[in-house]
Amino acid sequence: MATKKPFSRLPTNVLPINYNLWLKPCIEEFTFDGKVDIEVDVKEPTAEVVMNSMDIKISSVTYCQKDMKIFESSAIEFDESQEKVIIKFASTLAQGSGVLSILFKGELNDKMKGFYRSRYMVDGEARYGAVTQFEATDARRSFPCWDEPALKATFDVTLVVPKDRVALSNMNVISEADYFEKEFKVVKYARTPIMSTYLLAFVVGEFDFVEGKTPKGLPVRVYTPLGKKKQGQFALDVAVKALPYYEDYFNIPYPLPKMDLIAIADFCAGAMENWGLVTYRESALLIDEDNSSAHARQWVSLVVCHELAHQWFGNLVTMEWWTHLWLNEGFASFMEYLATDHCHPKFDIWTQFVSHDYMRGIDLDALDNSHPIEVPVGHPEEIDEIFDAISYSKGASVIRMLHNWIGDENFRKGMHNYLKQHAYKNAFTEDLWDALGDASGKPVRDVMGSWTRQMGFPVVSVTVKSRTDNSVTLKLSQKKFYANQKTIKDGKSPMWSIPISFSTYESPSKPVKDVLLKDETMEVTLENVAKTSWIKANPGTYGFYRVQYSHELLELLLPAIKDKSLPERDRLGFENDMFALAASGIAPTTDFLDALSAYENETNYSVWCDLDANIGSLSVLLWNDEDALNKFKKYILSLYDSTNTTLGWDPQSGEGHLTAMLRSLMIRRVGRFGCEKTIAEANKRFENHLNQKSSIVADLRSPVYSTIVSHGGPGELDKLLELHEKVDLHEEKERIERSVGSVKKPELITKVLDFAMTDKVRSNDKVFMIGSAAISNPIGRDITWEFVKKNWEKLHDMFKGSFLINRLVQMTTENYSSEQKAAEIKDFFEKNPPIGAERKVQQSLENIRRRLDWWKRDGKSISEWLSAKSE
C-alpha cells in the first residue's frame, strides 16, 4: 500500500442545518454559477469556518447572525490536499444560529464526478447535459459544504435551466417561473428530508419518461433518452414491485413524495442511489424488448433493486463514516437479490448469487492484499479504494450467512428496529448487530465481529472420526485460507465464529445439523446416516468459508454430483472449493481435473457459469505451455459437448430465462476454444444478421461476435466496428466493445485499442474495451500492457479516483505469471502512482506471483494429465 496522505475530518464547531442552493449551469461553456445560503449552528464562538470545497472559485462570503449582524469574510484560504476551504472573519462569530452566504463558480467537468457534463446524441447531433455524481466525496465539487456523511442537513434546491430542458432533483417541483433571461426558467424543489450531501442530485438534459404508481399511489418515473421511453418499461415494472416489497419487508414507508430513475449517457458506476432521483448508466436501466439479452434483463432488475434498497439502508439510515461503507453496499447487495427473487422468481437468482457475488468476494478476500470489511479510511483517495468486492460481495455474503443463521423473521424484525431507531441519523456496524441480536436472541455482535473486523476467511477441514451403520462422527478444524499456500505466515491462525450446517444423502435439501464452530477444532455426530451416504458441509453455500474433505468423504460426493442428487448450489460450491484448494496448493490441480468429468451432464446455468470461469482461469495458467493449452481446449470441448448439443443454437418455445443464458455461455466457450462447427455457424449467422436476412437473437450476439473476431481477420473486425457505429442501443455497443478484444493478430489488437480511445466509445466504456484485449490471449495481454504504459497519463487523468482505474489496472496486468513481469509492473506503478488503485496494484502483483507458484508446483502434472487424456 502507498503511504497514507495526512487527513483530518472537519471540525464540528460549526454545523449545517439547511442549504438553500441556487445553481445555473451554463452548459455550452461547461461552467456553472452558484450561490448557497447555509443555515448553520455555531456551537462555540469562532473566527473561521472550515468546509469542504474542491475546484470551486468562491467570489464572496458573508455571515448573518441571528441578530442580523453581518460579517464579511476577511480571507478565503484553500487547502487543496485536504479538499477544504477555510473562511476567516475579522471578528468572532457568536454562538448560535446564522446564515452563511457564498457566491461561487465551478466547472461542468468531464470526470464523471461532482457536477459534470454528459454528452448525448439527438438525431446525429452531439449535445450536452449536466449531471451529478457526489458519492463518496464530490458534492464539494458542486458547492462548498460539509461533505461528510454524518453532517446531515436539509436542502432547498433551485435550478436555472433552459426552458426546453428537463430539470430534476431529489424532490418534487414546487414552482416554475420565467427567468430574466427569457430562454431560461427557474425551477424550485421541495425541501429534502435531513440527509447526507453525497445523496443530493440534480440532472439537466433532454429526456422522455414512462410512469406508473405503486399500490399506495407513489408516482414512479423512468427517464430515458429521447425516443426511447419504451426501453424504460421493464425497469419501471421492477421499481413499482420492489418499492412496496421493501416497505413491507422493513415495515417502514418510503418517505419521499416521488421516485425517479434516470439513464445517463456518461456514467462511471452502474448506478447511484440519490434519494428520490437514482441515476444509472444506460445499460443498467434500459431494456429493448427485441434486442436485450436475458442477462441484461437480470442485470437491470438487480441494479434497480439494489438502488431502491438504499432508499432505506443508506439514505434513511446512513453509515457514520466511510469505514462503515459496507453497511450501505453489503446490505443493498444482499437485498437486491431478495427483491429480484420477489419480482422474478424464475431467475433462480440465489443460485446465481453464489456464482457471482459470493465467489467474487471469496476470491478477493483470499489474497494477502485484501482488507477487512471494515477498514479505517481517511483521505478521499483511500475511500475510493474500498468500493470493491469486499464491501459489496463479501459484505452481502456474510449478511446472507447471518440471515440464514438467525432466520428471516428475526432478520426482518431486527432490520425494522434498526431503521426505526436510527431514521434520519447515522449508525455504526455494532448498532445493526445489536438490533439483530435483540431480535434473534443470538450472539450476533460476537459472531459477526469476527467476519467484519479481520481480513480473510477460514478453510474448514472435515474428516471422519468414527462411523457406525446409522451415524457418523466428524472432526472439524478451521484455519485461515490463503490464495497461495507459499505465503502463509508463521504463528497462530486467526479464528472465526462459523455457523456450519450439514446435509446428507438422506436429507439433501434440509440441513440435518447446525453447529457454531468457535474454536480451532470440534466434533459433530450426525444421526441416521448410512455408511455409504454422502455428507455435505455448508449446504446451500451459505457460509463464507472453504471446505476441504477427507478422501473418503470426497469419493462419496462425486457420484451425487454426476447424478445431480446433490442440489445445484452444493454442486457449485463443491466445484469452486475444489478449484480454490488446487489453485492455492492445498490439493493437486489434477484432483479438480478429475472432478470435472462428474459435471459433463450438468444442466444448471449457475453451476456452469462458475465452472466456466474456473476453466477460463486454468486456460490463462496454460498460456505458459501452448501444447498443454491445446490439449486442454480439446478436453473442454468434449466436456461441453453433451450440454451444448442438447441446447443447440435456436431457442425453443417456452424455454426459460436461464436456458437462454446457458446457451450463450456454451457457444461462447466452445467458439473461443476452436470448435469448427460453432465457428462456421457463428460466421453464417453473423452474415445473415448484417444482411438483415435473419437477426441473431440478443442472447447469442455476444458469443457470436467474440467467436468470429477471435478466429477471423481484418474483415470481421471492420464489420463489427461498422456495426458499432450504426446501432443505437447502448447495450449493443457494449457487447461489441467487449467482444472485439478477442482478435489475435497484433495489428488488429492495436486497431481495437486505438478505437477505444476515440469519441466513438463513451468514457465509461473505454476501460472495458481496452481490458477485453488484455484478457483474451497472451498476444493481446502484452500489446495492451504496452499500450496502457504509453497512454498512462491520459488514461489516469480520465479515470483516477474512480472504480474504473481499479478495473483498468486489474484487467491489464494480472494475467501474467512471471517474476520479471511482476517487477516491471511494480516499477511502473511506483513511478506512476495510480490514485485510488494502489491496493489493486498490490493485488495484481500477488495474483501474478500466485499463478507463477501454481505453475511451478503443478504445471508438469497438469500437462501429464492432459497428455494422458488425449491418448
Image: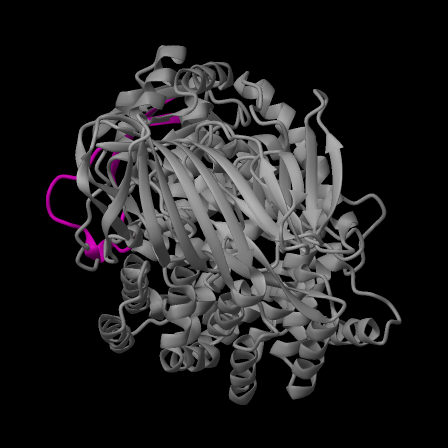
**Would you say 10 lies left or right of 289 here?**
left
Q: Residue furthest right?
A: 693
Where is 478 relative to 577, above or below? above
- Quarter occupied by residue 486: bottom left
Q: In which quadrant of the rendered view does residue 546 lie?
A: top left
Decide whether residue 60 is among the magenta residues: no
Give x and y (percent) for residue 78.
25, 55
Report the number of discs. 0
Q: Report the front residue among 297 and 365.
A: 297
Above or below: residue 177 compared with residue 866: above
Question: Quarter of the image containing the N terminus?
Answer: bottom left
Extreme left residue here?
Answer: 491
Residue depicted at 63% across the width and 80% down the height: 711
Q: Position of residue 549 (x, y in %)?
A: 36, 39
Q: Residue at x 60, y 31 (%)?
A: 339
Is residue 767 at least partly visible in the picture?
Answer: yes
Q: Which region is colored magenta? A: 471-500
Is 307 in front, or is 154? 154
Residue 613 position, x and y percent, is: 50, 57
| Residue 726, position as x, y percentages in the image | 74, 73
Q: How is the image coloured?
A: one colour
Q: Is residue 480 magenta?
A: yes
Q: Residue at x 58, y 36 (%)?
A: 189
- The answer to whether one can see residue 471 in this image is no
Residue at x 32%, y 63% (from the top left corner): 844
